[in-house]
Amino acid sequence: MDEGPLIESRRLIPPKGEFWVFGYGSLMWRPEFPFVAAESALLRGWHRAFCVWSIHYRGTVEKPGLVLGLDRGGACRGRAFLIAPKDAAAVAEYLHQREMLTGVYEPRYVEVELASGKRARAAAFLADSAHSQYAGKLAPAKLIRIICEGHGNAGSNLDYLRNTVRHLDELGIADGPLHRLLAQAEKAAKRKKAKG
């Protein structure tokens, strides 16, 4: 797969005004970039879902796992980070390196509702439904099986789900579908272990 041109064509350009970044997954608890403020934020029209095949971090090319993406429909509660103008270029470059490894995400500015009541334009990385790594909405049984079996260079897919739910709980962000998915995946993992 020739990834270079696709990735380069999708660079995040910092805005001239306020630069907000919306996190819905690991960016929320592990931003690893400087910011001057962070607050809870709601994005409408997109929801957090296991809709991206992972061939590096939680799976392999031969046996892909799944990671979170922002997929169309619904709404997503996450965190918005305000970036200082002096850090804007460096943060945009960092996000490009972190999120655009295979070009499965589309960087776009979206409107979010901040906890303060203010609306802001924030950079978000949306799942690209035309990309080969876009998994879409999988049947629940298939989703659970993949999460229970997936393993990549960052660890198991099930641990990724556990970690996500734990951090969302710590941040006070309710996500009933992910809680239900974790409960079902834990049951499936126990059954598999019991069978040997």
Image (spheres, rainbow, N blue to C red):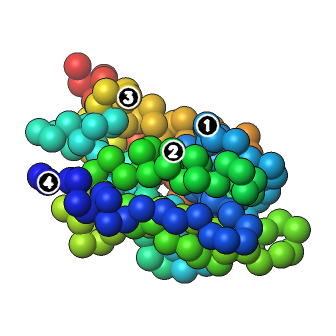
Q: Secondary structure at mark 4?
A: loop
Which residue ends up furthest to the right in the rendered image?
A: 116
Identify the residue shown where x is 38% and y is 28%. 154
Disc 3 crowd rating (10 Å Cα; few below 14, some 14-19, many 20+) is few
Q: Nearer the viewer, mark 1 or mark 3?
A: 1
Report the front residue among 7 and 131.
7
Q: Is residue 100 above or below residue 158?
A: below
The disc at residue 90 is none
Q: Secondary structure at mark 1?
A: loop
Displayed quadrant of residue 52: bottom left
Instruction: Look at the numbered discs 4 and 2 and tell me whether their residues touch, using CB distance below 8 Å.
Output: no
Query: Alpha carbon of mark 4 to alpha carbon of mark 2: how far?
Result: 21 Å
Instruction: Look at the numbered discs 1 and 2 and tell me whether their residues touch, using CB distance below 8 Å.
Output: yes
Q: Is residue 119 above or below residue 64?
A: below
Q: As drawn, is 135 to the left or to the right of 44?
A: left
The disc at residue 2 is 4
The disc at residue 154 is 3
Query: Alpha carbon of mark 3 to alpha carbon of mark 4: how far?
Result: 23 Å
Q: Secondary structure at mark 2?
A: helix
Instruction: Look at the numbered discs 3 and 2 and tell me whether their residues touch, using CB distance below 8 Å.
Output: no
Give the amino acid at mark 4. Answer: Asp
Q: Which residue bears the numbered disc 2?
A: 94
Query: Alpha carbon of mark 1 to alpha carbon of mark 3: how far?
Result: 17 Å
The disc at residue 32 is 1
